[in-house]
Every structure is written in C-alpha cells, then in structure tokens.
Image (cartoon, rainbow, N blue to C red):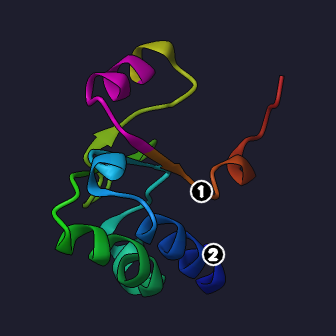
C-alpha cells in the first residue's frame, strides 16, 4: 500500500459511523510487523484511529503471521463462511488482486 492510499482510506473511514465499521475485516492484512514497521503509515492512518474508537478488527491473510487473526484462502467457500460468521459490517480488501496469479 502506498502512503497516499492509506490517507485516502483513512478519510473514507472517518466519514462512517461506528455501526458502519465494526466489526471490520481486513483481508490481505499482512503481518503486524508489516503494518507497523515496514509500512507504519498503514497502522498509523488506518488502524490506530479505528482502535482508538473501539472498532473491532479482524486481520485476515493467507499466511500465518503475528497479528493475523484468521488464516485462510478467500477463494475457498469454507473460509468465506468463517469470515461471514464474524458478521462484518465492513470489509477492507486492498492490494489483494495484485497477488492473483490465475484469473480463471
């Protein structure tokens, strides 16, 4: 994610009520290290404001990593059922399509 993208998302999220955001699913979240050290603007601009406002956040990724709450492949129906069971009000799915290798 680019800094400008994180600021754009921050602005969009700031316009939504708590009820429209919580719980929030962050698909393709990467690790806690990635969100806080490698690209710290992701945490600063997107997740810190949400956390301050007590928005429940579930970080979802295909890879087991620290800071990932739910691990699985969103292309698999059973995994999508797990996400649906969390009853998200908002799903953030940014920079995921760039990792798709087979579009068929």
Residue 69 visible in the shown view: yes
Q: Nearer the viewer, residue 6 or 62?
A: 6
Instruction: Tell me where residue 78 sits by quadrant.
Output: top left
Q: Which residue is mark 2?
A: 5
Residue 83 versus residue 1 in the image, above or below: above
Q: Which residue is mark 1?
A: 94
Mark before the other along the chain sequence, 1 or 2: 2
Q: Is residue 74 magenta?
A: no
The segment highlighted magenta reads 80-90
Query: What is the spatial separation of the Cα atoms under label 1 and label 2, in whole angstroms?
Result: 9 Å
Residue 41 versus residue 10 in the image, above or below: below
In percent of width and height, residue 48 lies at 28, 77
Q: Secondary structure at mark 2?
A: helix
The residue lying at 34 percent from left, 57 percent from top is 17
Instruction: Tell me where residue 13 sits by quadrant.
Output: bottom left
Pointer 1 and pointer 2: residues touching (CB < 8 Å)?
Answer: yes
Mark identifier at residue 49: none
Q: Residues within 10 Å of mark 2 (few under 14, many from 20)?
A: some
């Amino acid at each position: 994610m680019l800094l400008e993208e994180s600021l754009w998302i921050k602005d969009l999220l700031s316009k939504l009520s708590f009820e429209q955001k919580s719980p929030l699913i962050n698909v393709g979240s990467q690790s806690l290290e990635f969100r806080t050290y490698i690209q710290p603007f992701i945490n600063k601009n997107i997740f810190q404001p949400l956390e301050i406002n007590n928005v429940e956040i579930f970080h979802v990724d295909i890879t087991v990593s620290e800071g990932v709450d739910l691990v699985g492949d969103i292309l698999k129906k059973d995994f999508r059922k797990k996400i649906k069971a969390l009853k998200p009000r908002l799903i953030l799915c940014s920079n995921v399509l760039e990792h798709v290798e087979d579009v068929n």
